[in-house]
Amino acid sequence: LLLKELSSLLKELSKITMPIAFNEPLSFLQRITEYMEHTYLINRACSLSDSRERMQAVAAFAVSAVASQWDRTGKPFNPLLGETYELTRENQGFRLVSEQVSHHPPVSAFHAESLVGDFVFHGSIYPKLKFWGKSVEAEPKGTITLELLKHHEAYTWTNPYCCVHNIILGKLWIEQYGTVEIVNHSTGDKCVLNFKPCGMFGKELHKVEGYIQDKSKKKHCVIYGKWTECMWSVDPQTYEAHKKSERRGDNKKQKNQEGAENDDADDMPEVQETVSVVPGSTLLWRIDSRPAHSAEMYNFTNFAMSLNELEGGMEANVSPTDCRFRPDIRAMENGNMDEASKEKERLEDKQRAARKERAKNEEEWSTRWFQMGTNPYTGSQGWLYSGGYFNRNYQDIPDIY
């Protein structure tokens, strides 16, 4: 009975509007766009002739897509229904559009494509939150699909779980965990990646370990590293021999460690040494260092810092529903927290009033750039780009701000 009451209380807490101080000045649509920070890994995959080497590059991209979340304890703004975001990066060779296609449950759909026709990367994400007293766990429901058009290959996967510790008391810290399975639907190859929970004494914090196997389940390659640092690949036999010698060394070290218990906060484990590289390994990806002033800027990467920029002439071309025009995010970025809080409340009230009006008139919300459809590779339902955004015809756009 007590557990039932606690569960009910936590459900009610999840509906409470959090103070704006918990936020970072980006929409969740912009946070999704950070998947594209390491687009060079997709471009590398497109350039490789060997399918297993392509899988290694895709696996490194899948890990790099969550790397920007390291130390990012600020909550992105929940997108308003109909909110959009676009980003074109000619130097990285892609353009992207995203749309908030549902509010209950919250679903964000995105579509990115190569400027030279090499790849398409798309998906719809609906994070499912669970409250565990001292922590919040986000289950990133939704399939991600990467199509390498020249190679006629399609890869699908889902992101790992993300947990923010110490939401009540103590220093906030993040861990990612769970199994990510990347499937090459053309060859039947799979890459199974285990994002390890930190475990006792934090020995496993940030670690990722996995392998590439063919359709007969023969392992061809081991992939290992940390999602906060780098990923490497090596031959399976070499890796196993190295792990055995490491284990022998560990057994000789201190056997009687005792962990300090703390009922008030989950102490963040000390970040261990950087990745121990197995001789003969190939580097797949290494994270870029963050700018010197990142800690004062919500621990943003250089890429994240640029996502609110309105370059010359952009205002006339971008859809009026773009995140860059959101007054609460803009006010927060300018350091005006009181105005940001008022604007956030106003926008949420406006959204609720619009929803009531639609219900009264028995009207359904109509998405603009994405439609519900079937993923041809997995058979699952998801939101697929219906095209037309970059034609710049923004008539009959909803007034959401």
Image (cartoon, grey):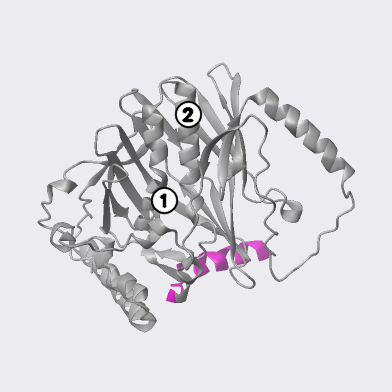
* Quadrant in which the C terminus is drawn: bottom left
Q: Quadrant of residue 166?
A: bottom right
Q: Position of residue 310 (x, y in %)?
A: 24, 63
User: Which residues make up the magenta segment?
Assistant: 1-20
Q: Quadrant of residue 5?
A: bottom right
Residue under label 2: 55
Tell me the CA gap for discs 2 and 1. 26 Å
Q: Position of residue 360 (x, y in %)?
A: 21, 65
Find out whether the residues at labels 2 and 1 contact each other: C-beta distance under 8 Å.
no
Amino acid under disc 1: Tyr
Left or right side of 238 for 57: left
Magenta segment main secondary structure:
helix
Residue under label 1: 126
Crowdedness near tag 2: few (<14), some (14–19) or many (≥20) residues, C-alpha within 10 Å = many
Q: Position of residue 22 (x, y in %)?
A: 48, 72
Mark 2 or 1: in front is 2
